Image (cartoon, helix red, strand yellow):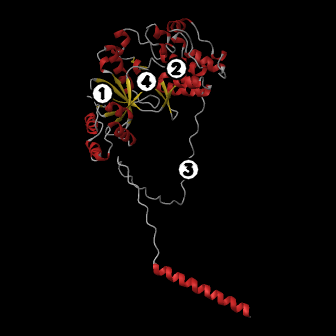
């Protein structure tokens, strides 16, 4: 549709978009006489009052009204991503819960390889329920696109943290790796291998909790039909993943949970040393994973104990048989080097005497019309008779004081 040039056209677009229910739409229409006639100015006011997001307003002002609602979810803002698919911050229409919608564009839905990888991520994540794994809430299809609904968390991934701070102190780095290992241990217990463990797929929430994400390459070991490599050939490797890729995985050989041990070990190497185990072009890095041992961390990373450097070297051994056999074994090896978690705060004893808090005044509903300024209260006027009486009393008091002074002087 063409861009709206008048306010009624703009409000009709909002109505057709499905962003508002009828009561919200009517609430705004009832105030149309008080709104600026220019759609852009009204859009700014709607953004200010929380009726629209800036992304929604921008699209509506361009005449676009479709695609804002996917099933039970309203799209709020696009989110920056590094991988495939399009991500949006969204809100469940009924529950008002903020989530992340990962949407596969309709022009890629016909690609068997892409679509299978997309739903494989859904199957892998849906089978897991762990505080250190990013939760999957829902899966759906709308407007010709398939989408996942994921937990919404605030924070940064470890790739961003490395770029921002460089190498981490050993105790802090190991503590983060252990959180990832706990999440991966549950996946392994359910016969699911992540196959893409790297700093960019380990997300640290603002609360300090680490969550494993990026399950798009996960494979159920006990489901032959889920082996996308066999069905569609190898080729899932990219330059980011290559830095943390187990040698057997790069060769297309069968993999088991020890490829995740390798990926976590290579990630910990980067957290401790500030860089991945190997450097160079993609082909050079892949060859080094096959033929060389990474430089010992103790040769360039400050404060890394020899024993910890040895554990990382064992986790990144070229032969899978030389690595810890399970994630539980890796956890046992790493735990002595981790910072101890802070003790929980002591509970505060309730006071013996408490006062009832004053009632909170209920806020009125939002209004797009600025409230009128309150008129100043008139100053109270005193009663005329009272003023006269006070004046007479003052005169009498003055006279009495004068007489008293004269009597004193004449004595």
Q: Are marks 2 and 4 in contact (CB under 8 Å)?
A: no
Q: Is residue 31 left or right of residue 253?
A: left
Q: x, y (%) of residue 86?
A: 37, 24
Mark 4 or 3, closer to the camera: 4
Q: Is residue 147 above or below residue 362?
A: above
Q: Sequence order check: which comes first, mark 4 or mark 3? A: 4
Residue 304's quadrant in the figure? Answer: top right
At mark 1, the secondary structure is: strand
Cβ–Cβ under 8 Å for marks 1 and 3: no
Residue carrying label 2: 264
Q: Is residue 377 above or below residue 326?
A: below
Q: Which residue is mark 1?
A: 140
- Counting residues from the start of the chain, the first of labels 2 and 4 encountered is 4
Cα separation between marks 1 and 3:
46 Å
Marks 1 and 3, the one that precedes in the sequence: 1
Give the residue number, with chain letter if any, for mark 4: 81
Disc 4: CA contacts within 10 A as few (<14), some (14-19) or many (>=20): few
Sequence-wise, the earlier of marks 3 and 2 is: 2
The kind of secondary structure element at disc 2 is helix
1 or 3: mark nearer the eye: 1
Query: Is there a contact, CB below 8 Å, between mark 3 and mark 2?
Result: no
SS of the residue at dot 3?
loop
The mark lying in front, picked from 2 and 1, is 1
């Amino acid at each position: 549709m063409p861009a709206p040039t008048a306010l009624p056209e703009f409000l009709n677009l909002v109505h057709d978009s499905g962003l508002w229910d009828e009561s919200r739409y009517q609430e705004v229409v009832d105030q149309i006489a008080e709104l600026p006639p220019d759609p852009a100015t009204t859009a700014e006011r709607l953004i200010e009052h929380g009726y629209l997001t800036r992304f929604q307003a921008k699209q509506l002002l361009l005449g676009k009204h479709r695609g804002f609602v996917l099933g039970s979810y309203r799209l709020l803002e696009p989110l920056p991503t590094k991988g495939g698919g399009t991500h949006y911050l969204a809100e469940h229409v009924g529950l008002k819960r903020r989530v992340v919608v990962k949407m596969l564009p309709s022009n890629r839905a016909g690609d068997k390889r892409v679509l299978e990888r997309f739903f494989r991520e859904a199957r892998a994540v849906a089978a897991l329920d762990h505080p250190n794994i990013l939760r999957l809430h829902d899966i759906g299809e709308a407007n010709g696109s398939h989408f996942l609904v994921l937990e919404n968390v605030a924070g940064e991934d470890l790739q961003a943290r490395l770029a921002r701070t460089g190498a981490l102190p050993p105790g802090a780095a190991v503590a983060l790796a252990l959180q990832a290992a706990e999440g991966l241990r549950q996946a392994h217990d359910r016969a699911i291998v992540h196959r893409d463990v790297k700093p960019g797929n380990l997300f640290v929430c603002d609360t300090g909790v680490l969550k494993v994400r990026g399950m798009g390459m996960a494979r159920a070991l006990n489901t032959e039909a889920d082996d996308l490599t066999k069905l569609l050939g190898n080729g899932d490797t990219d330059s980011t993943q290559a830095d943390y890729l187990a040698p057997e995985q790069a060769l297309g050989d069968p993999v088991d949970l020890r490829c995740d041990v390798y990926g976590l070990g290579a990630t910990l190497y980067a957290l401790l040393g500030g860089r991945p185990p190997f450097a160079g072009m993609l082909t050079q890095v892949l060859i080094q994973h096959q033929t060389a041992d990474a430089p010992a961390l103790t040769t360039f990373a400050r404060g890394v104990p020899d024993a910890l450097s040895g554990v990382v070297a064992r986790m990144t051994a070229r032969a899978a048989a030389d690595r810890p056999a399970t994630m539980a074994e890796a956890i046992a090896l790493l735990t002595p080097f981790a910072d101890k978690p802070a003790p929980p705060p002591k509970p505060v004893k309730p006071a013996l005497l408490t006062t009832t808090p004053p009632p909170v005044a209920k806020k009125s509903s939002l209004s797009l019309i600025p409230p009128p300024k309150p008129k100043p209260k008139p100053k109270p006027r005193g009663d005329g008779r009272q003023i006269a009486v006070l004046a007479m009393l003052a005169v009498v008091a003055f006279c009495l004081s004068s007489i008293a002074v004269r009597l004193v002087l004449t004595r």
